Structures are given as structure tokens and as C-alpha cells.
Amino acid sequence: MERHRLVQTLIINDLDEILLCKWHDGPCAGKYTACLGDAIEGESDEASAAAVVRALAGLKLDVARFEEVALFAFESTGGDGAAVFDADEVEFVYRAKRRECAGRRDSADASTSWFPLDAIPYAEMPADDALWYPRVLGGAVLEGRFRFDGDALVERDVRERRSS
């Protein structure tokens, strides 16, 4: 069975700010995440991540500068026990530098804003983000699993990835 692949890119500029998207609808409606979207069938995960950044924020990034920093699996129910997504959903997370602090646009799906790294709005983000963003932004490379019941994070297993 093919896994549903998501890509997320944490874009940091020279002013130590991160670009976040505030979602208009969907599972993250009203919440912030980094640029997040579905991987494109037949494309590399890095190329998919670049396409998501371009679609959501209007920024063109060189995939050669993308650094894979995490791989996560997610399982969730809708709060009423109905499956929303299962452990076959995986997310590849990248970190990318952007020299310019200017540039961003809003899309039909999300509004984008730059936030200082010491003022990331974790209270307005999915519950798992506060657990792994600081570690990834500090240089760690992670892997793990998260299980949600509605918006509530009910189980997690996050660890540093071993080098191969």
C-alpha cells in the first residue's frame, strides 16, 4: 500500500525569522505551520517541498539547499473515533535558508507571515510542533510517530535519527 506523503519546509531568513502559514480551512484551519502540503506523485520529496513553498508563499527555493531534518508518521481520529488519517501518512520535513527576509504572498489556502525564532506562536500550532520545532531549529535530525484524537496529542515517540 502506497503511503500518503506530506512535505513541510521550515524556511529561516538571515534575520532569524521563520515563515509560517496560517491555514484558512482543512485539518489545520486557524493554525500556523511551516509550508506544508502533499508530495507530488512522480516528483522527489524535495521537488514537492519546493512546489509547496512556491504555491503557498510565492517563494522560489533551490532544492539543493534543502536539508532533510525529520521524518514523522501520523495517526489520527476525529475525536469521535472515526479515522481522519492513519499511520500510512508520513511527513518529510526540510529546513532551508533564505537570505532575503522580504518576499512572501498569501494563497487561497493560507496567509503567510515571518516570525522571530524566539516568538514562534506554538499555542496557535498543532500540538506536535512545539515538541519538535525547537529541536530541529537547534540542529537535531529527528524521526518519530504522533497519534492524535481530534486536536489532542495522545501519544508520541520522537527521537534523534541515527546517521547511516
Image: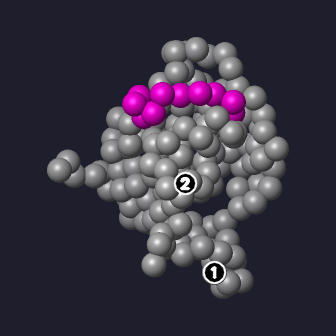
Is 52 positioned to the left or the right of 64 in the image?
right
Q: Is residue 26 visible?
A: yes
Rendered image: mark on residue 83: 1
Residue 5: x, y in percent? 51, 60
Q: Is residue 6 visible?
A: no
Q: Nearer the viewer, residue 107 or 153?
A: 107
Rendered image: mark on residue 65: none
Residue 50 sits in quarter: top right
Identity of the residue drawn at 50% across and 42% down: 47
Precedes in sequence: disc 1 or disc 2: 2
Q: Circle 1 — which element?
A: strand
Residue 104: x, y in percent? 70, 26
Q: Amino acid at mark 1?
A: Ala
The verdict on residue 45 being magenta is no
Residue 56: x, y in percent? 69, 39
Q: Tell me the crowding category of disc 1: few under 14, some 14 to 19, or many 20 or more residues within 10 angstroms, Cα based.
A: few
Q: Circle 2 — which element?
A: loop
Is 44 positioned to the left or the right of 105 in the image?
left
Residue 90: x, y in percent? 48, 63
Number of the front mark, 1 or 2: 2
Identity of the residue drawn at 59% across and 41% down: 51
The number of numbered badges drawn on the structure is 2
Residue at mark 2: 39
Q: Amino acid at mark 2?
A: Ala
Q: Nearer the viewer, residue 47 or 161?
A: 47
Identity of the residue drawn at 69% across and 39% down: 55
